[in-house]
Amino acid sequence: MSSAKKILTKLESISSKLDEVLNRLDKLEKKTINSKKNAPSSSPPTVKVGKVLITEYDKYILVTGDTFDIRNDFKVYRGKWDAESKGWKIMTSNIENYEDFKNDLQQKCSALKTTKGKLVKLKKPTSDSSSPGSDEGECMIMDSSDSESE
């Protein structure tokens, strides 16, 4: 066999192998494209929680109820957990669009209620109360442990 024929035979062999590789690549690309279409989206899943109550005050709102799973949403608005109120206090100045905030929260909970709150100031006892046990100041309770023993 002449060297030209040997080269031609080798080229035909290489050509058929290259066609096979290209066909396999094409099939692999089609599978990858289809799997990306069927794959779940990369956005995080929406968390659905129970009942949430927003109490609106002059300078802040208090969000109470089933908020544990969405607590990071409140941290975005620099909300602080208030253990005494058992809710998230968020300054209204930290919320750019309050209606969008409420709509977003509505999507994440089964029930959302909004109420107006009123601040109630408690009377603090004065340090110059007239006598122990008076209505304005502190009261003293005496028991046997308070008296000096023999």
Image (cartoon, rainbow, N blue to C red):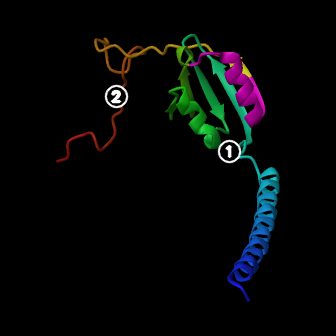
CA–CA distance between discs 1 and 2?
58 Å
Q: Quadrant of residue 13?
A: bottom right
Query: Residue flagged by tag 1: what amino acid is it?
Result: Pro
Q: Nearer the viewer, mark 1 or mark 2?
A: 1
Q: Residue at x 17, y 48 (%)?
A: 150
Task: Kindly tell me whether residue 36 is visible in this rendering.
Answer: yes
Q: Is residue 143 above or below residue 125?
A: below
Q: Residue at x 28, y 11 (%)?
A: 128
Q: Which mark is residue 44?
A: 1
Of 25 and 49, the residue lying toward us: 25
Q: Which residues are magenta?
A: 95-113
Q: Is 9 positioned to the left or the right of 82 in the image?
A: right
Q: Is residue 122 above or below residue 30?
A: above
Q: For mark 2, what is the residue?
A: 140
**Element under disc 2:** loop
Q: Quadrant of residue 143?
A: top left
Q: Is residue 38 above or below residue 137?
A: below
Dot 2: few (<14), some (14–19), or many (≥20) neighbours within 10 Å? few
